[in-house]
């Protein structure tokens, strides 16, 4: 797709596929704004009419993080989750893989993840999983305290 190509447009505050524009409107109308392939978004725009998710443009770093968090932990990612009595411990494991260990402090859990990824020379996404099962991607290099 060339930078000037587009399969979606913004019209009246909504996103539409070119084919889904309301009756009487077309992509040449002055109130219709193309979503060009070289544009950068914080999310992939979705057609209001048919629900199609347009993924042909670039995402900002916030958009990439949003999409990653929408997908959730994937196989081979690492999770740090609350465990033990009243969440007093932290369990570290690989999704669909081995259990790395259980640690008394957040700092120890993060240190174990750092040691594991550096030792294996494999740097997957690391997730903090709450006691309710909600996952949030974290950067272990920025993690100092919980």
Image: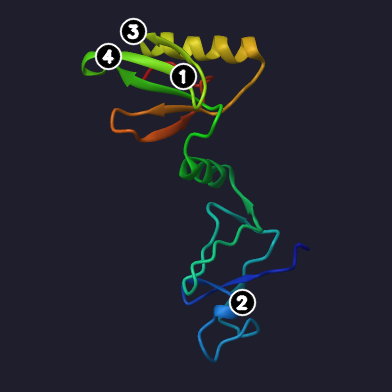
State how far apart marks 4 and 2 are (Cα).
53 Å
Say which quadrant the C terminus sits in. top left
- What is the quadrant of residue 9 in the picture? bottom right
Q: Which residue is mark 1?
A: 93
Dot 1 or dot 3: first in sequence order is 1
Q: At 49% across and 10% down in the image, what residue appears?
A: 112
Camera-side residue of 122 and 24: 122
Disc 2 packing (10 Å; few <14; some 14–19; many ≥20): some
Indicate the position of residue 32 as horizontal and vertical percent values: 58, 79
For the residues bearing labels 4 and 3, Cβ distance under 8 angstroms: no
Q: Is residue 48 above or below residue 27?
A: above
State how far apart marks 4 and 3 are (Cα).
9 Å
State how far apart marks 2 and 3 are (Cα).
55 Å
Residue 102 horizontal side relative to residue 94, left or right: left
As drawn, the label of residue 18 is 2
Look at discs 1 and 3 and give the one toward the viewer.
Answer: 1
Disc 3 packing (10 Å; few <14; some 14–19; many ≥20): some
Q: Which residue is mark 3?
A: 104
Indicate the position of residue 56 as horizontal and vertical percent values: 66, 59
Dot 1 or dot 2: first in sequence order is 2
Look at discs 4 and 2 and give the one toward the viewer.
Answer: 4
Q: At 48% across and 34% down in the image, what residue appears?
A: 73
As drawn, the label of residue 34 is none
| Disc 1 secondary structure class | strand
Dot 4 or dot 3: first in sequence order is 4
| Disc 2 secondary structure class | helix
Q: Which residue is mark 4?
A: 84
């Amino acid at each position: 797709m060339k930078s000037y190509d587009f399969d979606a447009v913004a019209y009246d505050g909504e996103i539409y596929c070119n084919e889904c524009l309301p009756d009487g409107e077309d992509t040449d109308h002055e109130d219709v704004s193309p979503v060009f392939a070289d544009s950068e978004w914080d999310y992939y725009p979705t057609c209001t009419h048919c629900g199609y998710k347009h993924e042909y443009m670039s995402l900002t770093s916030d958009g990439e993080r949003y999409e990653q968090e929408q997908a959730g932990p994937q196989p081979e990612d690492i999770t740090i989750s609350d465990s033990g009595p009243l969440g007093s411990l932290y369990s570290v494991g690989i999704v669909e893989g081995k259990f790395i260990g259980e640690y008394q402090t957040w700092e120890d859990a993060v240190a174990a993840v750092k040691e594991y990824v550096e030792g294996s020379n494999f740097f997957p996404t690391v997730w903090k999983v709450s006691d309710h099962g909600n996952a949030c991607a974290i950067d272990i290099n920025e993690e100092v305290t919980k």
